Image (cartoon, rainbow, N blue to C red):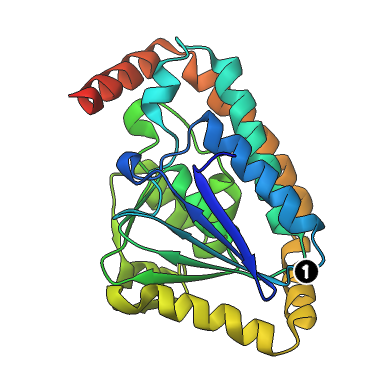
């Protein structure tokens, strides 16, 4: 059993925790498959009525594990395949009528934005910040970012994040509509759990169906967007520019 994402179920609540804190919870191949498999389990289990999603360590998620990508030797097909695995998990979480709350701290970068936005309600710690950084390594959005980000903040603001080096603070993320609440870091997980428990104590099925209806209104474009993202990031990964940037990034990380 992989421990890249921790998982437990208690009293109707599924609790998922990204668990690669030494890599800022960047997603490698093992974590990608674990994410998909847990999505399937959450979707299928009748005893799960709500989901709490968080991360271990100082950062929520730095996106894809660039060092692991570099180790593929520039094989865009492999990268696109892993994107497809992650995207299957995203589709299931997006479509399952079970509300998801995320507790987000520290850095949320690249594909980490997509993981965060899988949640239906996001609570951010006051020290959280949000960046794109895809172009820094010559790559393109994945993990639903090209669809979920403009849905959350609008096309123009999404472009600001994706086409510049702009970093948003937690308060700016709240103002943009990227997150629902900002709370002190020391009560972040307590607040997120309180939201999940509110759902469970009430008409959890009704909350879940409301989520399904709203998410379903854009589901077709979301699915198409995920497929397009996987193809595009795979192609981008094979470009000389991306190969050089990914290798340089991996070398810096190794030091």
Expressed as whole percent of the image width and height from the top left, the position of residue 213 reads: 79, 70
Callout 1: few (<14), some (14-19), or many (20+) C-alpha neighbours within 10 Å? few
Farthest residue to the front: give it.
1
Residue plotted at (42% across, 24% down) = 68
Q: Would residue 188 be found to the left or right of residue 92 on screen? A: left
Residue plotted at (34% across, 44% down) = 24
Expressed as whole percent of the image width and height from the top left, the position of residue 228 reads: 66, 33
Expressed as whole percent of the image width and height from the top left, the position of residue 18 reads: 47, 50
Taking 196 as reference, is 102 above or below it? above
User: Image quarter for residue 182?
Assistant: bottom left
Taking 88 as reference, is 15 above or below it? below
User: Image quarter for residue 110?
Assistant: top left
Farthest residue to the left: give it.
255
* Residue 150 in view of the camera: no
Q: Would residue 7 be found to the left or right of residue 25 on screen? A: right
Q: Would residue 57 be found to the left or right of residue 152 on screen? A: left
Looking at the rendered image, the quarter that the N terminus falls into is: top right
Which one is nearer the viewer's eye here, 244 or 251?
A: 251
Residue under label 1: 47
Residue plotted at (60% across, 87% down) = 198
Q: Would residue 87 be found to the left or right of residue 116 on screen? A: right
* Residue 126 in view of the camera: yes
Residue plotted at (73% across, 41% down) = 224
Secondary element under disc 1, as helix, strand or loop, is loop
Looking at the rendered image, the quarter that the C terminus falls into is: top left
């Amino acid at each position: 059993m992989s421990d890249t994402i921790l998982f437990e179920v208690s009293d109707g609540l599924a609790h998922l925790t990204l668990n690669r804190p030494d890599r800022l919870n960047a997603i490698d191949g093992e974590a990608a498959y674990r994410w998909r498999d847990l999505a399937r389990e959450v979707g299928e289990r009748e005893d799960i009525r709500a989901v709490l999603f968080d991360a271990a360590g100082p950062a929520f998620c730095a996106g894809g594990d660039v060092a692991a990508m570099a180790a593929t030797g520039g094989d865009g097909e492999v990268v696109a395949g892993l994107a497809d695995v992650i995207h299957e998990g995203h589709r299931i979480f997006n479509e399952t009528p079970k509300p998801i709350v995320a507790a987000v701290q520290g850095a949320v970068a690249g594909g980490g934005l997509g993981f965060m936005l899988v949640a239906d309600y996001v609570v951010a710690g006051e020290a959280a910040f949000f960046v794109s950084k895809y172009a820094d390594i010559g790559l393109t959005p994945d993990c639903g970012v090209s669809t979920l980000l403009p849905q959350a903040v609008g096309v123009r603001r999404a472009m600001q994040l994706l086409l510049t080096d702009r970093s948003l603070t937690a308060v700016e993320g709240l103002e943009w509509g990227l997150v629902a609440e900002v709370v002190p870091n020391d009560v972040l997980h307590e607040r997120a759990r309180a939201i999940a428990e509110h759902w469970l104590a009430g008409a959890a099925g009704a909350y879940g169906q409301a989520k399904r209806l709203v998410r379903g209104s854009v589901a077709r474009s979301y699915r198409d967007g995920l497929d397009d993202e996987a193809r595009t990031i795979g192609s981008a990964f094979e470009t000389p520019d991306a190969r050089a940037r990914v290798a340089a990034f991996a070398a810096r990380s190794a030091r």
